[in-house]
Image (cartoon, grey):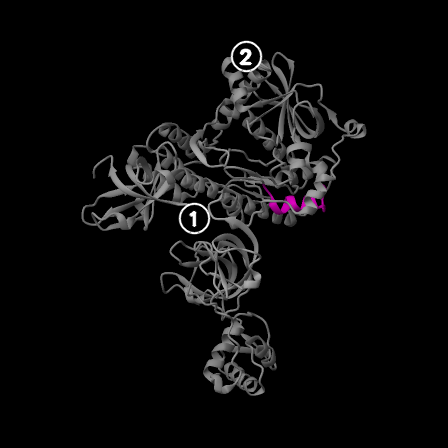
Amino acid sequence: MTRKPQPAKKARTKKAAGDTKKSLTGRALSTLRQHPGKLLNYKQLSKLMGITDDETRKLLNSCLNELSAAGEIEEPTRGKFRMQGKEELVTGTIDITNNGAAFVVVEGQDEDIYVGPNKLRHALNGDIVTVRITSGGGGRHTEGEVVEIVKRRREQFVGIVEISKHYAFLVPDKTQMPYEIFIPLDKLNNAERGQKAVARIVEWTEKQKNPIGEIIEVLGNVGENNTEMHAILAEYGLPYRFPKRVEDAAAEVDETISEQEIAARRDFRQVTTFTIDPADAKDFDDAISFRRISDDRFEVGVHIADVTFYVRPNTALEKEAYQRATSVYLVDRTVPMLPEKLSNKVCSLRPNEEKLCFSAVFELDADANVLKEWFGRTVICSDHRFAYEDAQQVIETKEGPLAEEILTLNDLAQKMRKKRFAAGAISFERSEVKFKLDEEARPIGVYLKEQKEANQLIEEFMLLANRKVAEFVGKPAEGKARRTFVYRIHGEPNQEKLTAFAQFIKRFGYQLQTKTKKKIASSINNLLTDVNGKAEQTVVETLAIRTMARAEYSTKNIGHYGLAFDYYTHFTSPIRRYPDMMVHRLLAHYLENGKSVDADAYEAMCKHSSEMEQLATSAERASIKYKQVEFMKDNVGKIFDGVVSGVTQWGIYVELDGSMCEGMVSIRTLTDDHYEYDEAEFAVIGRRTHRRYTMGDKVSVRVVAANMEKKQLDFEMVRMEVPF
């Protein structure tokens, strides 16, 4: 190993060392730019610049006076200087693309600011930075330079440990961190060469090429399943175990339910109640109760675990739940938001156990119209636990446990579903990729999980509860002010993306109506039905989803476009989602006629929850990608059929039939022509032959490499089904 650490260089403080007036002036301007708006005298500036001798400090003072006289800086107070007030400074988030280009995204500003690689000042992807605008609209982009890193997105990185005689490095994945982290040998924390570990940056001055860090956790040997799953979590800053103080707090939770608490609640213990969940589920958030009032009237209760009864504000359990904000579902494990005692035992609505709930109870007629509604705290006792497959068998055979209740509820759910789509809801129901794992969590098979009527039964009643809770709080009564609440919102699709999508699907013979919200929804639903089972299904579904806005949490209600609801929230999964806990607390507060709460405080919590949800989703996708690569590593050299699922300037992505494993054919390996990327056409096109590879094309590829470390499959093109 030939690398050498690059420690900070000591400030050169003597004139003979090269601090000429010209270079000193440049350094002074650079330092002032890094502290926009701050008034500094020459002594303060000298300290920031590392100048300690009197001679250079006097020279610096002379430089500052000359800059002020020339109008390059201002001196609003005698002897104190700052950059001119007209200097344009903006704050935003660094977004570094796959090819290394860096842009600063400023909220509320349409155009991003380009920052050259030599002007980043060690800013990394996702950091919040202050940028000085250096050029306006003359070039292709507005350009700028980073003058201050306001907040690091992350200071911990996952990588491989490399050790030499006198020093060590952590080598991270280049996509997340393009610099190797220098680790002093006494900061290795027993990490060994070649192991995966997590390092924290402890020092990184502007003059240091590499950051200096310390190993804070050794994950284990590369390729071991636990090591790789923990590495995925660490890459996204997600924990995989609870601190001892949180486990201790969970252990102290009292499981007994007092008679006094039962007396304060509406009692559903004698009403038929059941749960329907995945076969391997352990945390049962929700249960359904059913009672026939008359031939055409039914009482349906949606009972949700009363998590906030056990997780109180300002406790260790509460603080940990907020920080995590969500459970994370990797291929081989669940990383829960709450410790196991709560998530799988105390709060889980297990059969034949009395449980505390927060409930939404509805009286429905035979057409699934809501006649009455009630919200409040309850106590239940579930009579039966169904897996989805068990409930589906009852629906299909019309026989089995609680058959009358299941069949009646299914009939009501299908009627609600039909109304929802008639109102403009969009049916995005892509099949989930699932793996069959052996005892060591190695993938031995891939299958697709389909949504059937049993899933839809639960979905429709959860949607009903979420919508009605949001309406109850969100719709202001006549003469009353609007109350702060947590909504799950989803904006209208981006018109530009929608137009491009409509143009793209024409090549498959499909049309999309884009004039009104309702026509868009109806047209997309028809399209998704038409492509079902066809070669282009995955591509069309993927692009349709990409045209949609991202759903998120907010106190500012804009409705939920995809569900066609004016009011919508998340009330039904407080074991695994922190926003649902917020909703439970707010609903209880308003049921007791409490005043509206601080909107800004709740908006900040909504933003945090949305961000954590995205991190969890990214980690989940990374675990799927890892298992897909692991599944395919024994198939190197074999040929598979697939469909082009994406095209970029560097490669063609292909999703294999059946397994839905995705890999890339590098443009460099297409040697029959020089291929160029056409963004508008979603295609790469040969300059001489005009051969096109575009999304939706059926192709055959050979697996040439399965890189576990990069979670990457490399393919080479064998043939296209349709000749050019």
Q: How many marks?
A: 2
Q: Which residue is mark 2?
A: 399
Q: Which residues are magenta?
A: 312-326
User: Could you tell me which secondary element the residue under label 1 belongs to?
Assistant: loop
Q: Quadrant of residue 447?
A: top left
Amino acid identity at mark 2: Glu
Q: Which residue is mark 1?
A: 709
Q: Quadrant of the N terminus?
A: bottom left
Above or below — where is 29 with respect to 607?
A: below
Does 379 appear in magenta? no
Q: Which mark is nearer the camera, 2 or 1?
A: 1
Q: Residue furthest toward the left?
A: 688
- Tell which of 631 and 318 is nearer to you: 631
User: Which badge, 2 or 1, comes first in the chain's sequence?
Assistant: 2
Q: For the residue carrying disc 1, how many other residues have a C-alpha within 10 Å: few (<14), some (14-19), or many (20+)?
A: some
Q: Quadrant of the C terminus?
A: top left
